[in-house]
Amino acid sequence: MVWNVSKALSGAAAVLLSLRAAAEGGIDRGKWEALRKGVDYSETLPEQAEQSGSSFWWIVLADLLKYGLALVIIVGLIFAVIKLFGAVKFTSGKSVFEEEPIPGEEANAAETPLSALYAALEKAKAEGRYREAIRLLYQIALKKLGEAGKVDLRPEKTNRDYLNELREKETAAAFGRLTRRYEYIWFGEGRAGRPEFEKYAPQFTEFISTAGREK
């Protein structure tokens, strides 16, 4: 816009001066050439400049879109890997990907997933901690009752609370026997070596296999 106005003013000045010269008795060609010197009548230069500036911004925009898309793809891949391999802990000196730890004596039916209870049971048996293995079998039995909707699992409840919730007499009687066995071994002075575990474990596993059935 500014370019066109400047060109128009320069051209108008040249025409006025040429008319004045003609009125005074003729046009001196040398003066005419001097007046025309520096006046550019070309229409292409501003357009070329405008097109050049426009092309520059299109290139910048294309680069931004390209790198932005690449960033989105990279972030998406990172989150996909994290989801695939499990929880990630960014801790100096440690591996980025860490397996979920197997719970110890804090494992309970109300707060620990069934899969974690089974993993803790296998670990206890492998390490010869049969007293802990009996406790975990009891927690698994409770978990099964909770999944079947026969008891409402809560950390603050006692074994007696769960017994009182059971409405099926046969289930309540069987769970009562397991409760007495477990409490004798865990809270009392009951021996809990490998022979005792192999003797009592089938009673727990049988109850676990039937705890979710409808009577």
Image (spheres, rainbow, N blue to C red):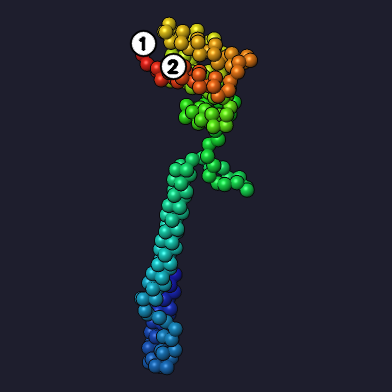
Percent x, y of residue 16: 40, 81
| Residue 105 shows up from this direction | yes
- The secondary structure type at the circle numbered 2 is helix
Q: Is residue 201 above or below residue 70?
A: above
Q: Quadrant of the N terminus?
A: bottom left
Q: Specify few, some or many for label 1: CA neighbours under 10 Å numbering under 14, 14-19, or 20 or more.
A: few
- Location of mark 2 (residue): 207
Place of residue 191 in the rendered image (x, y in percent of width and height, measured from the top left): 60, 18
Which label lies toward us, 1 or 2? Answer: 2
Q: Secondary structure at mark 1?
A: loop
Whether the residues at callouts 1 and 2 have beta carbons within 8 Å, the answer is: no
Q: Which residue is mark 1?
A: 215
Name the amino acid type tagged 1: Lys
Front in this rendered view, residue 189 or 37 = 189
Single out the residue that lies furthest toward the front.
195
Q: Earlier in the sequence, mark 1 or mark 2?
A: 2
Task: Give the residue drawn at x 40%, y 17%.
Answer: 210
Location of residue 215 with respect to 14 vertically, above or below: above
Give the left or right position of residue 205, taking residue 102 as reference.
left
Percent x, y for residue 35? Answer: 43, 86
Which residue occupies the foreground of this view, 147 or 8?
A: 147
In this rendering, position of residue 179 left or right of residue 35:
right
Which quadrant of the structure image shows residue 58? Answer: bottom left
Whether residue 146 is visible here, answered yes or no, is: no
Quadrant hosting residue 40: bottom left
Structural distance between the alpha carbons of marks 1 and 2: 13 Å
Split into 4 quadrants, where in the image is the C terminus?
top left
Looking at the picture, tell me which residue is in the foreground, 120 or 200: 200
